[in-house]
Image (spheres, helix red, strand yellow):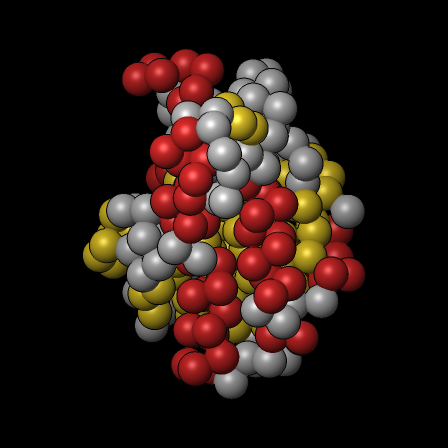
C-alpha cells in the first residue's frame, strides 16, 4: 500500500501507477521539496476552507485544503503531527491536498474538500481515492478534556486523528477500499518525521504534495 522510495518519500502504490499523477508524503530527509517552484501552498489556519488553485503556484491565501484539475503546480500541505490527506479523482484528473489538525478535523475539512471537488469538477465521491499520510498516532496523541469533548469523549484521552478523518471520508461517500492509511506515527518515528509534540519549537515541517506530472 504505502512504500518509501529512494528519495525517502512515502507513496501509495496504486496512485504511483497512475501515469498522469505525481504525489508523495515527504519526510524530514526530503528537504529539496521545499524549494520546488511548482508548489502551491496555503497559510494553514486549522479551518474548513478549501481554495481552488487554478494552476497557480506560490502562497494562495488562507485555508487548509487546495483543490485543482489543471497541470502546472503541485498542491502541497505542511505538517509536523497534523494529518495530511491527498484525494484523487482519476476520471476528472482532479485532486486535493488537505491539512487536518484537530481543529480542522472537528471542522470536517476532509469532507469539505470532497464537497468542493464535487461542486467544481463533478467529482463523484465513490470514485475518489484517498491517502491519509503520516501524522501523530493515537498512541501519542493525548488531549485534555476540552479537546476530547470536541470528539465526543469525556475527560483526558487519546484521540485517533487518522481514524476520525477516515470515518469522515466514509460519511462523505468514499468507499473503504479506496481509502489508504499510512499508520505511521510522526512522534514515534523520529528517524523519518518531524513532530511538534516531540520537538516543540525545534520541529521542522514535512511537505505532502499532489499534482500532474
Vertical position of residue 9 compared to residue 181: above or below:
above
Horizontal and vertical percent for residue 3?
73, 39
For residue 87, above or below residue 105: below
Q: Name which quarter of the figure residue 178 lies in.
A: bottom right
Which residue sits furthest front?
Answer: 154
**In x, y percent, where is residue 36?**
39, 45
Dividing the image into 4 quarters, which one contains the C terminus? Answer: bottom right
- Is residue 64 among what the camera can see? yes
* Residue displayed at 32% across by 53% down: 47
Quadrant assignment, res 79: top left
Across and down, in percent, residue 25 comes to 56, 42
In the image as oriented, which residue stretches furthest toward the bottom? 122
Residue 28, can we see it? Answer: no
The residue located at (42%, 57%) in the rendering is 109
The residue lying at 43 percent from left, 82 percent from top is: 119
Task: Name the residue at 39% across, 61% down.
Answer: 66
Q: Is residue 14 left or right of residue 20?
A: right
Q: Position of residue 34 (x, y in %)?
A: 38, 38
Of residue 185 and residue 89, the one placed in the foreground of this image is 185
Indicate left or right for 177 with 138 as reference.
right
Q: How many marks?
A: 0
Give 177 or 56, whichever is nearer the viewer. 177
Amino acid at each position: 500500500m504505502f512504500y518509501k522510495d529512494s528519495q525517502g518519500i512515502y507513496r501509495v502504490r496504486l496512485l504511483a501507477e497512475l501515469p498522469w499523477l505525481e504525489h508523495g508524503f515527504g519526510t524530514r530527509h526530503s528537504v529539496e521539496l521545499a524549494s520546488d517552484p511548482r508548489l502551491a501552498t496555503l497559510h494553514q489556519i486549522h479551518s474548513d476552507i478549501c481554495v481552488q488553485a487554478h494552476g497557480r503556484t506560490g502562497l494562495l491565501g488562507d485555508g487548509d485544503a487546495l483543490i485543482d484539475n489543471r497541470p502546472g503546480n503541485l498542491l502541497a500541505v505542511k505538517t509536523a503531527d497534523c494529518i495530511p490527506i491527498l484525494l484523487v479523482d482519476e476520471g476528472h484528473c482532479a485532486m486535493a491536498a488537505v491539512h487536518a489538525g484537530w481543529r480542522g478535523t472537528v471542522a470536517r475539512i476532509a469532507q469539505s474538500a470532497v464537497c468542493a471537488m464535487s461542486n467544481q469538477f463533478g467529482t463523484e465521491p465513490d470514485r475518489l481515492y484517498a491517502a491519509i499520510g503520516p501524522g501523530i498516532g493515537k498512541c501519542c496523541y493525548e488531549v485534555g478534556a476540552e479537546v476530547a469533548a470536541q470528539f465526543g469523549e469525556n475527560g483526558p484521552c487519546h484521540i485517533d486523528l487518522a481514524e476520525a478523518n477516515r470515518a469522515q471520508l466514509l460519511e462523505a461517500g468514499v468507499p473503504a477500499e479506496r481509502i489508504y492509511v499510512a499508520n505511521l506515527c510522526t512522534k514515534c518515528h523520529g528517524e523519518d518525521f518531524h513532530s511538534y509534540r516531540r520537538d516543540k519549537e525545534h520541529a521542522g515541517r514535512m511537505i505532502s504534495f499532489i499534482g500532474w506530472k
